[in-house]
Image (cartoon, rainbow, N blue to C red):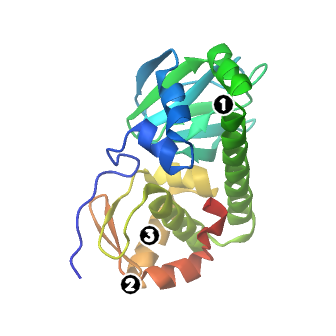
Amino acid sequence: MTIRRTRPSGDSGVSLRDRLIQAGLEEQYADMLVQMPHKVVQVEPRRPFREPGVARDEVMFVRSGILSKFKTDGSGRRQIVALRFPGDGILPREGAADYGIQAIVKSEVMVGRAEDFNELVEENPELARFFWKLIQRHNSIGYEWLVNTGRRDSTARVAHLLCETAERSGIDVRHDAMVNPFTQQQIADITGQTSVNVNRVFADLERQGLIKRRGREIQFTDWSELRRVASFQPGYLQ
């Protein structure tokens, strides 16, 4: 089997417009969204892009890269509670948001005003239906993450994250190696464990012959077994 190198996860080269169309939005409505007044922001991963507790009268769409939503506990420890891949949005909300936003990798984000976005949605019921479906999908992902951190062991948690990331990134696991977008600390912040334990899990997955690593590239050498270990069923991503 020949393994091809791929772009980093979240960097497929596909435009935001095409991503929205792939997600089921008709072309005319995709055009409306990408043509609404906005600015394009380059987001570095080393510091929060939006802090928790701040009013969020804006809409965001990920053009490239990966954004995370995070929360912190009383001692300042961080838990990443959601990821947004290219084509995903973070919708406006009333009042202060109880989560922060930070990039996993260098990302490009379209940021528009809430009032412009809300006006489009109010005037076009098709957009409202589309975003309602996306909200339901993100809810399903959130429920799966809750099970992952609450019931699965440390190996299954990391395996599940790798499976989900490959699926959401559109990786052809039979032929393509995935560029791991996460640091070990980020994986720890997603799966609710320490970075030291994450390192042990990766070593164990390699010993079991489920993955091979070369730098940041991960080759899935036994995808079906990795899915079994992770209890990964991709239906919740639809």
Residue 57 visible from this viewpoint = no
The location of residue 89, given as percent across then percent down, is 58, 36
Q: Which residue is mark 3?
A: 202
Residue 18 visible from this viewpoint = yes
- Residue 190's place in the image compared with 157, above or below, is above
In terms of sequence position, does the residue under pointer 2 or pointer 1 come before the other?
1
Circle 1: residue type: Leu
Circle 2: residue type: Gly
Report the disc number at residue 209.
2
Q: Label 2: how many residues lie within 10 Å, few (<14), some (14-19) or many (20+)?
A: some
Viewer-closest of 37 and 214: 37
Q: Secondary structure at mark 3?
A: helix
In terms of sequence position, does the residue under pointer 1 or pointer 3 come before the other?
1
Q: Secondary structure at mark 2?
A: loop
Q: Which residue is mark 1?
A: 91
Identify the image quadrant of the N terminus.
bottom left
The reply to whether the C-beta atoms of the residues labelled 1 and 3 are less than 8 Å apart is: no
